[in-house]
Every structure is written in C-alpha cells, then in structure tokens.
Image: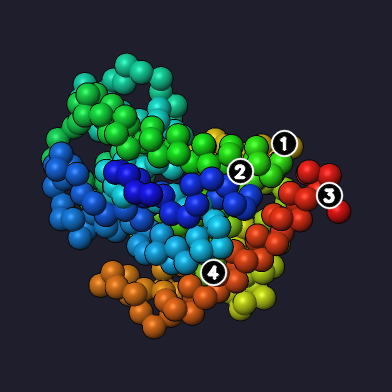
Amino acid sequence: MNTDPISIYGPATPAVPLVLDSPHSGHRFPADFDAAVSEFDLRDGEDCFIDELYRPTTELGVALIAAQFPRTYLDPNRHAGDIDLELIEGGRWPHAWMPSGKAAIGKALVWRTLDDGRAIYRRRLTVAEVVGRIERCHAPYHRTVQARIEAAHAHFGVSYHLDCHSMNAVAGAQGEGGPGTARADFVLGDRDGTTCEPAFTAFVANLLRSLGYGVKVNDPYKGVELVRAYSDPGRGRHSLQVEINKRLYMDEAARRPHAGYARLQSHLGQLIEATLDYAGSAARRALGGA
C-alpha cells in the first residue's frame, strides 16, 4: 500500500509484534522546496537505501513505513514544535514551540544548513510554509507510525519498534560528536535506557557483534522523537534507534551502493529474524502463554 508522502510495506494488519520505520530515506523533492543548493547536495542528509535494505524483511510479516520526502525538507524525527527561529520570517513561531537544541547545528524540524555548514535557503521561510510542511509530511508520518505500533501492541500485548537510520562514516563540520569523528559500524539509541528494556538493546547489540560489527550504544546518537514519542517500556512498548555506517554498503561520494550492500542486507535479515523470535517470546509471555 503506497501513499504520498509515505510508503507502507508489509501486511495491512499486524502479523508480528515488530514495526520498522525509515524516516530519512526519501528523495522525492517537493516543488516548493526552493533550496539554494542542488538536490544532490540536499541528499547529504539522506539515509540512502535504508528502506530498500530492510524491505525484504516485510516478507516475514513486518510492517515498514518509509518517508518519501527528503529529510532536509522536513525531518520527521523531530517534534512538530522543534522550530529553528533563525529560519522563520520575523523570528517568531505562533504555535507550540518545543526546541530540542538541534537548531544550534541547523537541524531542527526544517533544516537550515547542511552537515558541512552551508545554508540551504537564501531567505527565511514563512510560518505558513512551515505549517504546510507539517500538515503534509510530519503529521501523516507520525500518525502512521503511532497507529502501526498501537495496532501491534493491541494484538500481541507488546510492540517492538526499530527506527532505522544510517550515518556518514565521518562526522561533518556540524555532525554529532564533533567534526572528523569516525563512526562505529552500528550505533543503537534508546535514550539512555528509557525507550526500551535494556535487555532488548543488549540483545540487538550482541547479535550485531556476533556478525562481526563494532557497536556503540547511545554514542553519539541516543535516539530522538520517533523512539521517544511512542515508547513506554513499562507497558510493553519498546523503541530502539538503529544507525548503520554508510561505508558498510555505499560509496558516500557517489551515493551508490557498493559490493558490501548484499552482505549487509543479508545480515539485517538475520537481525530481523532474531528480533522476531525475541519479540514473539515476549508476546507469548504478555498473553499468558509459555
């Protein structure tokens, strides 16, 4: 089932207690973007091919939600009130304002700068423009993710949610952790143990390590809005952000997959199969089974 600005893969009703979402893999550029840099440059913020890497796992009954709009146009992994006032005409936001601190590096709800510090726009945006982006992109994406998590939880008594991302191999001028910082193969983010049970984070980390990958937890990425908003570990709602180093599967400069793509995709399949076993055991416990 495909909708614009979102694509949804997998069954329409919950078949397993696992939901995947890829908020940053979109590259359909809206006509009203009006950016001062090229589309190629704007894709620097994109989690290239992440939706495609995970898509085969939907054959296991997993739902996958993928944004089709670019992250640099609007970042669904932000609160709708996370507005960068420096980007807004008049410097005022008349609606609920929920700053996260990301505006300091130009990466609030609507990005002001690229990772290398270049300005995305030659002008400030009007309140109406930003509200339109929220209504067309942010609101439907969040409604869809929330609905899929709630449906899985209602059916199985638990829900497990992987928020799927990729990261540049080395941090740029405004990257997390400081410019020039080399990234691990994987970074898992559970907001310091608040968005899922620690055992689940440890399970995913250990599985990835068993496949030969270097893994860090909450360093430098702890997870942002999509794992925060719909998680409640005490009530069986578990969300974990998964960041994959782009060097494992693509040529970052050319934005093309390389020979490592197939190997990584196979390993992600193993990760999801193992996670389904883990989530299935938790569901049986939640429903009073053995």
Report crowding for label 3: few under 14, some 14 to 19, many 20 or more residues within 10 A (C-alpha): few
In the rendered structure, find residue 74 and report the number of the disc placed on it: none
In the rendered structure, find residue 152 and report the number of the disc placed on it: 2
Give whichever of discs 2 and 1 has the lower sequence position.
2
Mark 3 → mark 4, Cα distance in angstroms: 28 Å
In the rendered structure, find residue 268 and report the number of the disc placed on it: 4
In the rendered structure, find residue 289 and report the number of the disc placed on it: 3
Mark 2 → mark 3, Cα distance in angstroms: 17 Å
Side of 222 where 141 appears, left or right: left
Identity of the residue drawn at 50% across and 52% down: 11
Above-or-below relation of 244 to 280: below
Residue 217 lies in quadrant? bottom right
Give whichever of discs 4 and 1 has the lower sequence position.
1
Residue that label 1 marks: 235
Seen from the viewer's position, the closer of residues 266 and 164 is 266
Whether residue 113 is visible to the viewer of this picture, yes or no, is yes
- List the single residue furthest toward the bottom: 259
Identity of the residue drawn at 54% across and 56% down: 62
- List the single residue furthest toward the top: 94
Mark 4 → mark 1, Cα distance in angstroms: 27 Å
Give whichever of discs 2 and 4 has the lower sequence position.
2
Residue 40 image position (x, y, % from top left): 20, 60
Tag 3–tag 4 contact (CB < 8 Å): no
Element type at mark 1: helix
Element type at mark 2: helix
Mark 2 → mark 1, Cα distance in angstroms: 13 Å
- List the single residue furthest toward the right: 290
At label 1, which amino acid type do we have? Arg
Element type at mark 4: helix
Above-or-below relation of 51 to 13: below
Identity of the residue drawn at 45% across and 74% down: 248
Give whichever of discs 3 and 1 has the lower sequence position.
1
